[in-house]
Each structure stands twice: as C-alpha cells, then as structure tokens.
Amino acid sequence: MLDLSIFTTAEAWISLITLIFLEIVLGVDNIVFISITSARLAPEKQHIGRKLGLLGAMLMRIAFLSVASWLVHMTYPLFTVDIGFFAHGFSIRDIVLFAGGVYLIYKGIAELKGVLSLEDVDESGNASDSPSKRIGLPQAIATIMVMDIVFSIDSVITAVGLADHLIIMVLAVIIAVLFMMVFIDAVSDFINKNVEMKILALTFITVIGVLLFLDSLGINSGIEVLDMHMEKLMVYFAMLFSVIMELLQIRYKSNLAKRMGASDAEEL
C-alpha cells in the first residue's frame, strides 16, 4: 500500500511543487517537438496525436522513475574515447543524448529547409496539405515517446535526486503532463498558423539538438541553474525573448491590417 502519510510534512509538498515546476520548465522543448511532429499528421488526427503523444511520454517517465535505482547507473561510463585532444567516458545517458541530439539537428534542419523552400505553400501562396508528407498516428506517437526519453532523461535523474519518495515523483510528472495537455493544442495551432513561429520553433529544436550533442561529449559550462546547464538556460531565455518580439510584430501587423481595412471602407 502507498504511504500517504508523507504528505503531512512540509518537505513532501515543497518537493512536489519544485518537481512540478521543473517538469513544466524542462518540458518546453518537448512541447515544441510534439507540435512539429503532430503537424505531419492528417488535420483530423493532430489533436488526438498530441494527447496520446503526451500520455505516452508520461508513461515513459513513470516507467523510468519506477527503476530509480537503475537510473543512477546511467551516468557511469561504459567505455572511454581518448584521441589525444579529446577524452571522454561515455555512459548510457551520453549515448542517449548523442543519438537524440543528432536526430534533433537533422529534424530541425530538414524541416527548416522545407519551410524555406516553400514546400508547404501552393502557387497561390496559401498553405498546402500534401498527403505524401504525412505520417501515421502510430509513427507520430512512437517518435514522441522515444524522443521524450531524450528530453526527460536529465529531469528524471534530477527528480530521483530531489525526492525520496516515488509517489511524489510520479505525481509531479502526472500533474505537469496534464498541465501541458491543456495548452498543447493552442501552442501547436499557433506555431503552425504563423510561419515566423514555426521557423523560430525549428531553430529552437536545432539548437537544443546541438546542446544535447555537445553535452553527450562532456562539453558544457559546468554551471547549473534550475538543474539546467547555463547554456541551455540562455537558449531558453533567448527563445522567450524571440517569442515576445514575434508576438509584438504579429499584433502590430494585425492592428495595421485592421486600420488599413477601416480606411478602405471609409473611402468606399
């Protein structure tokens, strides 16, 4: 039976709130990836694809947490690469980050290339829906679940270090995922409807891939804030600043279009 008496202590609640906050913050890159991946689904399947993707991601994280004692060993070096100017012991974590980082770099650059070459725009300048570029629902969900391992590996290891009770870690993951489920459709639709946001999201995915790749090689600042390396936090802040700037530009263009429309109406 579960021992719920731990929730009578302030320490348990502080751990829970802290973990929920970290799961949400560290889940931003996952939300962006889900938005990009679900955009390749048929329009009528995108909503269910996002929800099932997040549900699958939640189950993956809970499964990770259930083998907490094994997670500690994921940071132990399996082998060492020493080529003179570079020496690094690769652990399971490093291998996962390396593979995930390479995939994100490929995915981001490939999608950016498609956007910039106007592959999704027809001759009249409107967005086109090419069935040949769609993916199936099982493929989308499987991709999201596999990539969630990459995105969550550090946050899960952090959770194991911050909380002493599995129930607290599982509750934090469930609450954070439910929170993300509420906003995933709005975020995804907004990204897909505004090409500037889509380009920004793909750039973000590519940069995160580069950071994961470098981290797998042991190349990082070594400075951590909110359990994130400083360089990743800087990318998050740069992303936030860019999003705010884009939102202001979108609002400006919207207001300008309304004013021009009103002026044309008055002339008529």
Image (cartoon, helix red, strand yellow):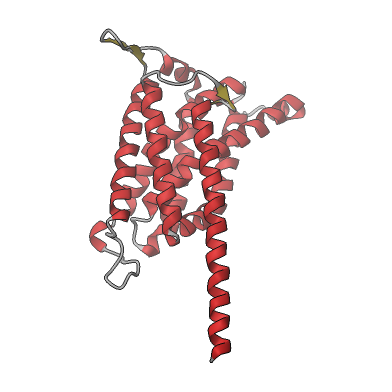
Q: Nearer the viewer, residue 244 or 132?
A: 244
| Residue in the picture at 28% in, 57% down | 134
Direction left: furthest residue: 132
Say whether residue 240 is left or right of residue 120. right
Nearest the eye: 118 or 120: 118
Residue 170: percent from the left, percent from the top?
57, 33
Location of residue 169 in the rendering, given as x and y in whole percent from the top left corner: 58, 30
Q: Is residue 135 visible?
A: no
Which residue reaches farthest front? 267
Image position of 25 (left or right of 113): right
Image side of residue 6 versus residue 90, left or right? right
Q: Nearer the viewer, residue 185 or 2?
A: 185
Instruction: Return the x and y of residue 79 as percentages of the image width and height.
Output: 30, 11
- Residue 241 x, y percent position in the rendering: 55, 45
Q: Is residue 95 above or below residue 63?
A: above
Which of the 4 quarters of the picture holds residue 33? top left
Q: Tell me if I can see residue 28 in this picture.
A: yes
Q: How many marks?
A: 0
In this orientation, which residue lies closer to the viewer: 220 or 168?
A: 220
Residue at 34% across, 70% down: 126
Q: Where's the N terminus, which quadrant? A: top right
